Image (tube, coloured by chain):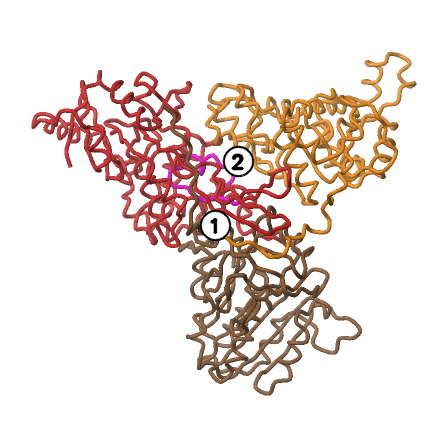
């Protein structure tokens, strides 16, 4: 006897989507687009450093870092680089479009441990997106942290993301700021060179400094070397690693990191302290 | 369950309703067996015909369309100057071009022509007056014009036709799996052909056919082309099963001789 | 719970009775010494003596392709329905290596966040184990990881006592199925002890390295040269992971109907051996080399699950070695790593 195939609805399914509506969108650079998204069921309820899975109907999902601080209520923001199938498709979306959301997922930046300490943010390229969720959180809770320095790097001046906001950080008296570009253009009056060149110029008290570094994999090696040279303890260097998180629940295996402890980037990370992942052959 | 208040917009690039996309089929050097696969789709064909408007299809209809095409299917490989010119003209009128079937996507069996000096093979086919007959080394479609979608196979695999059509209608890229056929064959729990003492091209051929041939008792002939980074470990596979490496390369040439056009700069495109 | 006795000639009646209640699957011969779990309706279809099947019974727990969500988007908006599909099924003749595999998967999918698709389906699967009294072939390494003996995870468990099977009943569900079968006598239990004692002489650590040494070996193995040899042979066909009873990595894909409005999300098996597995948008590939991917596979069996679940995720079934197109041999690799460590 062959029994019938039963098809049952699961109320608490892991795959159920939250529906989100794009309430604002803006092309930031030819490659990056910014989206402000409101969920139908309320707040995203995330913490700085977490990510969501964005589902476009029938196209699939992709993990995207939340780039807004949870202190900002009512909606959340994503910065999407058109790099893959889903993200390219997402660039065609705009205000009013509905998308599916799962999450938030991942271990956030260790905000509690960092409070009361000095902070040195180092962002390269699109790394500013996840870091911005934390920077703005710190700005909104400025009294809870010590000295704050922000170092930014990008390829060319035109690739600078969140220019207006960056200008506001720059003006603040309670924030140290510096930025650099790899390749200059005629209007650029600032530094030219890799982001590593900015680190020696920052005065820090390494014992009480947490350095949060987010950027492309190639950047980590060199920035971390500079930070260690300055005496920042390995436990106080915080990174956000990139992997292809497909499920967000520590199961599908795609985001596992080559490391004796085989971390799932989606669940054990994406934020890690350097001492946790330093044995990995590739950050 | 949530119901959104506003409709979900389809992205701008997708072919939009209500005007049904105009679809045409053109054949070059081939057996037209892949076009027949369309008529073999049965009920699914009726669904497809509900979604598109077929304006040229030699195997089933004979009307002629003189405007632009939304989607064209190119079947067959390119083996003379006239075909090359005709293909370029079709490309100029087509918004989306699909290389359809092994002859189109990888040159297919027609590529075997490239194993011999051109004049020699022309003489053997057309006799002493062979110069009167135009002929060039065989090229796959992408070696002449830009291709938007590839549907591999000899013949094409029906479920994949459907997938590609849906992707094309929505303006989404379709990615041909870049894993060996073994990946799908194992999931179908076929007894490995090597265990049966037969050399099979599954370990180097692109999946996406759901190991159609092996499911039906045949070896894989490599009709979907090789994976983009084929293993150099052929020697190990062969040594495990006591086979000669030349056997594998020889078998691969049956469908994949045109691959050399991609590898040698200055040839092909 | 209780032990019962089933005479060999009564197996057919047992299977037929079982198949009146649910679908029954069991190992069947496919020729060339290959076997697969498939639906049966009588005892004669079953290969009672078999080497591990091409795919392990995990295919019933997490199907190769599994629909998890139905959705539609149209002028009215977006609707969705998360679903699980299952079939009431009895899996007959599961060897202890595969029982061990199933219990590994149970741990993975019970871990939070729980995977309801897996857990709901699992409750509709009925497992009947079958003891191995000799090795299936030389590729097995079940004694290394102590998977040659039953460690639970079944409803019923059959051990061959010559002309009869002694059945260990492990669950209430199992109890219902042995109703009417005689209880095992003291003589039967003695025969079982004797069979197990004989087994101790047959099954010996297959690699000459103690299992408890493996964690230390792996803690130093990240930079081992052994991986280059293994990677150099690898075809990246994914056979080793597809046939592994504890591999559970998956991919998620969306597909739509020709109406372009309705569609579904599907979970499919994936393999860490595929070149695209650890690639991210923008083309950075975190395990680009075959050697890195093979190393990852071994770490997923002998290192990572030890930290997380306190056990190896290798059941010694030998499938990966049997199926490998290019002679990558699990036992040899472990021996090489151990030799390098010394």
Which chain is in brown here? A
Q: Which residues are magenta?
A: C231-252
- Please tell me in which quadrant of the rendered image residue B210 appears: top right
Left or right: residue B225 versus residue A73 is: right
Q: Is residue C317 magenta?
A: no
Task: Identify which residue is drawn at 46% across, 36% down.
Answer: C64
Is residue A81 or residue B72 the one in the foreground? B72
Image: C71 above or below B105: below
Residue placed furthest toward the bottom: A173
Q: Are marks 2 and 1 on the same chain?
A: no
Are the two marked residues, 2 and 1, in contact with CB atoms closer than 8 angstroms?
no
Residue A15 is marked as: 1
Display colour for chain C: red
* Corner quadrant of residue C130: top left
Instruction: Please indicate whether residue C251 sits to the left or right of residue A113 in the image.
Output: right
From the image, which quarter does the N terminus of chain C lie in? top left
**Do we see residue C180 in this rendering?**
yes
Could you say whether the residue bearing mark 2 is in a helix, strand or loop? Answer: loop
Q: Residue furthest left?
A: C186
Q: Which residue is mark 2?
A: C235
Colour chain B appears in: orange
Q: Position of residue A139 (x, y in %)?
A: 55, 80
């Amino acid at each position: 006897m062959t029994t019938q195939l039963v098809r049952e609805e699961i109320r608490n399914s892991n795959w159920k989507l939250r529906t989100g509506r794009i309430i604002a969108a803006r092309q930031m650079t030819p490659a990056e687009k910014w989206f402000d998204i409101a969920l139908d069921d309320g707040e995203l309820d995330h913490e700085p450093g977490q990510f969501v899975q964005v589902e476009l109907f029938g196209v699939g999902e992709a993990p995207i870092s939340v780039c807004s601080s949870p202190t900002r209520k009512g909606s959340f923001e994503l910065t999407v680089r058109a790099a893959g199938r889903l993200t390219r498709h997402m660039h065609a979306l705009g205000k009013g479009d509905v998308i599916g959301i799962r999450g938030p997922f991942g271990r956030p930046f260790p905000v509690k441990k960092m409070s009361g300490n000095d902070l040195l943010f180092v962002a390269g390229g699109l790394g500013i997106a996840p870091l911005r969720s934390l920077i703005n959180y710190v700005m909104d809770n400025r009294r809870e942290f010590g000295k704050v320095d922000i170092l930014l790097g990008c390829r060319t001046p035109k690739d600078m993301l969140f220019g207006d906001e960056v200008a506001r950080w720059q003006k603040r008296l309670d924030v140290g700021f510096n930025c650099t570009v790899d390749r200059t253009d005629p209007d650029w009056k600032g530094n030219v060179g890799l982001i590593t060149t900015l680190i020696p110029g920052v005065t820090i008290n390494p014992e009480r400094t947490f350095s949060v570094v987010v950027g492309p994999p190639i950047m980590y090696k060199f920035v971390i070397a500079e930070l260690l040279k300055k005496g920042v303890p390995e436990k106080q260097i915080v990174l956000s690693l990139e992997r292809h998180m497909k499920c967000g629940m520590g199961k599908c295996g795609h985001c596992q990191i080559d490391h004796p402890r085989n971390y799932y980037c989606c669940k054990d990370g994406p934020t890690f302290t350097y001492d946790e992942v330093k044995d990995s052959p590739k950050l | 369950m949530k119901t959104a208040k506003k409709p979900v917009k389809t992205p701008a690039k997708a072919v939009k309703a209500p005007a049904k996309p105009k679809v045409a089929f053109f054949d070059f050097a081939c057996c037209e067996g892949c076009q027949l696969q369309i008529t073999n789709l049965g009920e699914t064909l009726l669904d497809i015909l509900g979604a598109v408007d077929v304006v040229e299809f030699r195997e089933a209809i004979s009307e002629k369309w003189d405007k632009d095409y939304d989607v064209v299917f190119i079947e067959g490989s390119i083996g003379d100057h006239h075909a090359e010119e005709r293909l370029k003209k079709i490309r100029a009128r087509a918004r989306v071009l699909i290389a359809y079937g092994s002859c189109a996507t990888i040159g297919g069996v027609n590529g075997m022509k490239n194993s011999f000096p051109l004049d020699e093979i022309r003489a053997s086919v057309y006799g002493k007056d062979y110069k009167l007959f135009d002929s060039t080394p065989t090229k796959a479609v992408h070696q002449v014009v830009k291709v938007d979608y590839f549907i591999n196979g000899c013949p094409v695999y029906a479920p994949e036709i459907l997938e590609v059509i849906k992707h094309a209608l929505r303006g989404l890229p379709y990615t041909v799996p870049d894993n060996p056929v073994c990946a799908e064959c194992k999931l179908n729990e076929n007894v490995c052909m090597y265990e049966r003492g037969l050399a099979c091209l599954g370990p180097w051929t692109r999946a996406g056919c759901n190991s159609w041939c092996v499911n039906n008792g045949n070896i894989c002939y490599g009709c979907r082309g090789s994976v983009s980074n084929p293993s150099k470990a052929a020697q190990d596979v062969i040594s495990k099963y006591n086979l000669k490496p030349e056997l594998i390369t020889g078998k691969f040439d049956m469908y994949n001789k045109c691959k050399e056009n991609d590898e040698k700069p200055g040839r092909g495109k | 719970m209780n032990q019962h006795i089933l005479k060999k000639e009564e197996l057919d009646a047992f299977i037929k009775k079982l198949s009146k209640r649910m679908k029954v699957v069991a190992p069947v011969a496919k020729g060339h010494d290959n076997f697969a779990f498939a639906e049966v309706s009588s005892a004669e279809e079953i290969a009672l003596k078999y080497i591990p099947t091409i795919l392990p019974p995990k295919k019933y727990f997490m199907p190769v392709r599994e629909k998890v969500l139905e959705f539609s988007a149209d002028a009215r908006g977006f609707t969705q329905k998360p679903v699980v599909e299952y079939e009431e099924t009895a899996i007959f003749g599961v060897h202890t290596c595969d029982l061990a595999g199933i219990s590994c998967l149970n741990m993975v999918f019970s871990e939070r966040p729980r995977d309801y698709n897996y857990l709901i389906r699992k409750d509709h699967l009925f497992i009947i184990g079958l003891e191995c009294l000799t090795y299936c072939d030389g590729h097995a390494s079940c004694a290394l990881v102590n998977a040659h003996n039953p460690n639970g995870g079944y409803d019923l468990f059959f051990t061959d006592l010559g002309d009869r099977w002694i059945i260990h009943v492990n669950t209430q569900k199992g109890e219902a199925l042995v109703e009417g079968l005689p209880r095992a006598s003291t003589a039967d239990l003695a025969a079982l002890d004797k069979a197990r004692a004989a087994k101790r002489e047959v099954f010996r650590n297959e690699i000459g390295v103690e299992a408890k040494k493996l964690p230390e070996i792996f803690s130093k193995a990240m930079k081992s040269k052994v991986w280059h040899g293994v990677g150099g042979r690898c075809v990246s066909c994914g056979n080793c992971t597809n046939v592994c009873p504890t591999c559970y990595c998956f991919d998620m894909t969306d597909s739509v109907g020709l109406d372009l409005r309705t569609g579904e999300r599907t979970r499919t098996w994936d393999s860490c051996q595929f070149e695209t597995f650890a690639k991210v948008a923008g083309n950075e590939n975190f395990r680009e080399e075959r050697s890195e991917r093979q190393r990852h596979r071994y770490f997923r069996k002998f290192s990572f699950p030890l930290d997380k679940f306190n056990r190896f995720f290798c059941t010694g079934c030998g499938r990966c070695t049997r199926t490998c197109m290019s002679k990558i041999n699990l036992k040899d690799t472990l021996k090489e790593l151990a030799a390098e460590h010394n």
